[in-house]
Image (tube, helix red, strand yellow):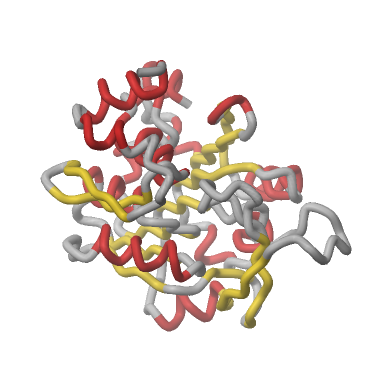
Amino acid sequence: MNSKELKYLIRSLSLGFVINLRNKSHDLKSFIWNGRKVYYRSSTSDMDLIYQILLKSKHKAEYFFPRQVSPRVILDIGGNIGITSVFLAKIFPNASIYSFEPLIDNFKILQKNTHEYKNIEVFNFGLGSRNGRFKVYLSEDSENFGGVSFFPKEKGHKSEPYTECEVKNINDVIKELNISLIDLIKIDTEGSEYDILSSLNHEIINSVSWITGELHGNRDFELLDYLNSLGFSISFKKLINNRLFMFSAGKKEIISQLSRKEIRIL
């Protein structure tokens, strides 16, 4: 058993979960978390998501969502297989959570992982600044089901594998769902974060208290400058293998309520 497998065993307390790290079939598996089944594909990035979000200790977990936000409405933009949504449903059981995932293979598992949660609604489309069907470029790593992008790695590189997915204007969707405010946003859209957040109506974005997401090297500085201009305090931390950076953006009234320990987590 290598060090990664040992860490997964200690956190999951499931030998079957650890065995599936080596199961290259990518079959659909499940294990119990919070009294419910969590579905994932064996030996894929799904398992890393589960470990990073559900299994690691609070101060080392991928995302930090302060309870002081007390959200009524949460958007999970880039829902993947629903790991963040079910985590949010546990810590904020009274919130209404809307999870958006454009890729059908991910979405089918998202449905399975969230169907027992009455406060989670899921949608098989992405959010953006306009409506349409767009190319989504797939990861060359056959085990990475989250590493997709709306941007090709090399412009004009025609052989790069892709699929197409539906994207809807974020303001139209919010209006259709009769959402008047959003308290918390988690966003992981592989480089489209600025396009999405800067498209939000000012009344909506100004109602947001906390945003957590990833930086992917596409318009990151514009995104951070934009959030700073709206009064967010921004912090960063390294993610898996020092390759990506997480960011957390909180309104000053929330930051001022955090304990020293919570600030260190940021």
Q: Looking at the picture, does residue 238 appear above or below residue 91?
A: above
Side (left or right) of 226 relative to 22:
right
Which image quadrant: the N terminus? top left
Q: Looking at the picture, does residue 51 appear above or below residue 226?
A: above
- Residue under the point 46% across and 53% down: 185
Side (left or right) of 89 relative to 256:
left
Viewer-proximal residue, 245 or 224? 245
Where is residue 228 drawn, in percent x and y?
A: 65, 43
Side (left or right) of 170 relative to 80:
right
Where is residue 197 drawn, in percent x and y?
A: 60, 59
Where is residue 2 drawn, in percent x and y?
A: 40, 18
Viewer-proximal residue, 117 or 220? 117
- Residue under the point 51% across and 53% down: 145
Where is residue 235 drawn, in percent x and y?
A: 57, 31
Q: Pick out the residue farthest to the left.
A: 35
The image quadrant of residue 217 is top right
- Residue under the point 55% across and 69% down: 127
Q: Looking at the picture, does residue 264 appear above or below residue 19?
A: above
